[in-house]
Amino acid sequence: MRGNTKLVMNKFHTYIASKQLPAGNKLLQEEPHRSLVQNRQPQRSTRIGHKKGEWWKTWEGKIQVVDRIIDAITINRIMRLLPITYLHVLHLLLRFQSTSVERLRDLIMIRHESVVGVQEGHQFTASCRLSNIVSESGTFDIEWERATEGHTLERILHHSLSPNEEAVQYLSEKVKTRVRGSYLNASFSILNLSPTLLEDSGKYFCYVNGLKSLTITLFVCIPFKDIFVDYEPKEVMEGTKVSINCAAKEGYPEPLVQWIAAGDDITKEAITVMERLPDKTFEVKSSLVISVKKGVKYICSIWNKYIENLLVDWVLPLPSVTVFTPHKNIVGIVGNSVELICDVSIPETDPVTIAELGFYWVNKDQNSKEHLIYSFINEEENLIDQDPRYTNRAFLYWEDFLNGSPDLKIRNVSIEDMGEYICRVKKRGKLIGEDLLELRVAAPYSNPVITYGQQTTNFRNVFLICQTEGGFPLGNISWLADNGKDITSRSKTVTKLSDGYFDFRSGLYISVAEGTQFTCVISNPWLPDKPSTSVTFMSK
C-alpha cells in the first residue's frame, strides 16, 4: 500500500506542475465555496526532526494539503482541473498511510531490545541512546518504566534534558532508594539499579519524547548452591535398571537441565520437575531410569544461561577395567632395552579376577598387520603365536604386573622394532580395554671429527671438513663461528645411507685469522644431546 501511495503522490505532483500551480498559487488562498469536507485549520507538525518549512513533507502535512485543496476548490473547478474521484482516492490513501505510520511508530522507534542477566545483589545498568533522535529544540524527556512479574506498568524515573538544564525525578517508591539516573556525553540516559532484588526481574522500557527507544528483559538470578547426583540400587550388574537422580536447590530462574552418557544427549529420557519454594527460588529434581552399561558415566548439568553459571556432577554405577598407556611416544636407543608402560585398573566393585583376564602386547606394522609380542593367559605365559623377532627379547616385570601394570620390556632394540604397540586386555576372550603407544628407535651419531686443508701459506684461506656417521634418523650438521654466528649456509653437506644408518660429510671453505675458532655440531631430532667438536687456528 505504501508503494501505491507513492505512485499517486507522484502523479498528483506531476499534474499540479503541468497546470503551473506551485505551492504559493492563489488557488490555495482563495476563499472556499461549498467544500466536499469540513474546512480544517492546518496545524504545524510537531514530529521530532522536521525542519522549519518542511512540515508538508510528512504524511500529516500531505493530508492537510489535500484537505485544503478539497476545501478551496469548488465542484466546477474540480471538474475543470482534477477528477474528483482522483482526489478522493488520494485523500483516502493518505489517511490510511497516516494511521499506518501511527501504528508502526513504536516498531520503528525501537532502537534496541535485549535480554540481560544480573546476579542478585549486583548492579543493573541500562543506557538509552539519544544521539539517533533529533530534537529541534534540543530538549529531551526520558521516561523509564518497567513491568515486573505480577505487576502493572510502573514508572521508575523521569529524566529531563535541555541545553541548559538537567533534572531527574524518581517516581517509584519501591526502588527510589536504589535507582539513579544520569546523563552521559550528551548521548545516553543511564539507569542504574543497585543492589538488585529478585522481584526486579521483568521488562524495562525507555521512552524518549514519548517514543519507545529501548526494551530490556532483566533476569535477576540466584545461582544454584550445589548439585548432587546419586543412583539406586547400589548393587548393580550390566543391564540392570537403575534410577539416577540429579538435584539442585535455591536458584533462580528455572535452569536448563541436561543429561549426557557416553557422549550422547539423553535429556529426553529424563523426567525433570521444577518446584517453586516460598522464597520464590526453585528446586530442581531430575530423574533418569536406564539400563546401566559398564564403564559409562552419567553426567547431569544445570545451566543458568543468563549469568553463565554451570554446575556438573556425575556417577559411574558400574566401573569397568580400564587400560591406559601414560607415555604415548617412547624413544629407545639401538642396542639398549626399552620399557613400554601400561596401567590396568580393576575396580574393587568388579568381581573379575586375574584368572579371567588375558593380557596381550601386540605390534602393528606399516600395513596395519598385528604381530604378537607377548601374552599372559590363564595366569601363565602364552608365547605360542609370538613373533620370532621377539623371542627371548620381550618379557613382563612380574612385580609390576601383580600390581596391575603389565609393563613390557624389550631387550636389544633395533630400528626394525619401531611402530605402534598395543596393550590389550580381554575377559574370557572378549575385549574389555586397550590403549596404544608409539615406539621410536634412535641411533646417536658418532662424535664429529674436523680435518682441514691449507691452500695458502698465510693461513688466510682453509677448507674444513666435518664427518660423523652411524646415526638415525636423519639428523642435521651445522657450523658455528667463534662468535656463535651460524655459518652453515656457506658449507656444502653430503649425506650417505649405509645399512640403514646415516653418515654426514660437510665441507666449509673460509678465511681465517689467528685465534679463529670453528665448531661443527651434530643434532638428532629424537635425542636431546648434540655432540660437537671445534678447531682453533693459531700461528706457528
Image (cartoon, helix red, strand yellow):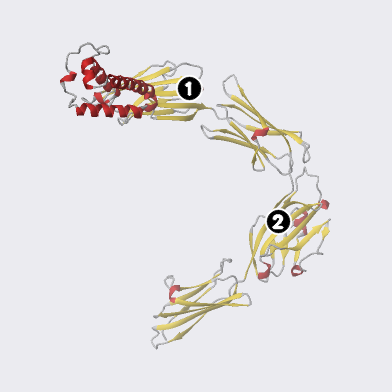
Indicate the position of residue 372 as horizontal and vertical percent values: 75, 63
Indicate the position of residue 242 as horizontal and vertical percent values: 74, 34
Q: Is residue 33 visible?
A: yes
Q: Nearer the viewer, residue 136 or 317?
A: 136
Mark 2 and mark 1 lie on one chain; the one further toward the N terminus is 1
- Which image quadrant: the N terminus? top left
Q: Nearer the viewer, residue 86 or 361?
A: 86
Residue type marked 1: Asp
Which residue does the numbered mark 2 point to in the structure image?
342
Q: Going 47% across and 26% down the picture, which residue do you hit?
A: 218
Q: Going 41% across and 28% down the picture, which residue do you hit?
A: 126
Q: Going 40% across and 87% down the picture, which residue do you hit?
A: 456
Indicate the position of residue 172 as horizontal and vertical percent values: 41, 16
- Relative to 265, residue 213 above or below: above
Q: Is residue 136 visible?
A: no
Q: For residue 269, which quarter of the picture?
A: top right
Cα–Cα span, label 2 and label 1: 58 Å
Q: For residue 437, which quarter of the picture?
A: bottom right
Residue type marked 2: Cys
Residue 253 in the figure: left or right of residue 378:
left
Kind of element beneath mark 2: loop
Residues marked 2 and 1 touching at CB (< 8 Å)? no
- Relative to 297, residue 182 above or below: above
Q: Nearer the viewer, residue 444 or 104?
A: 104
Instruction: Single out the mark in the foreground, 2 or 1.
Output: 1
Which residue does the numbered mark 1 point to in the structure image?
200
Mark number for residue 53? none
Indicate the position of residue 424 as horizontal and vertical percent values: 74, 55
Kind of element beneath mark 1: helix
Crowd band around label 1 with a 10 angstrom C-alpha radius: few (<14), some (14–19), many (20+)? many
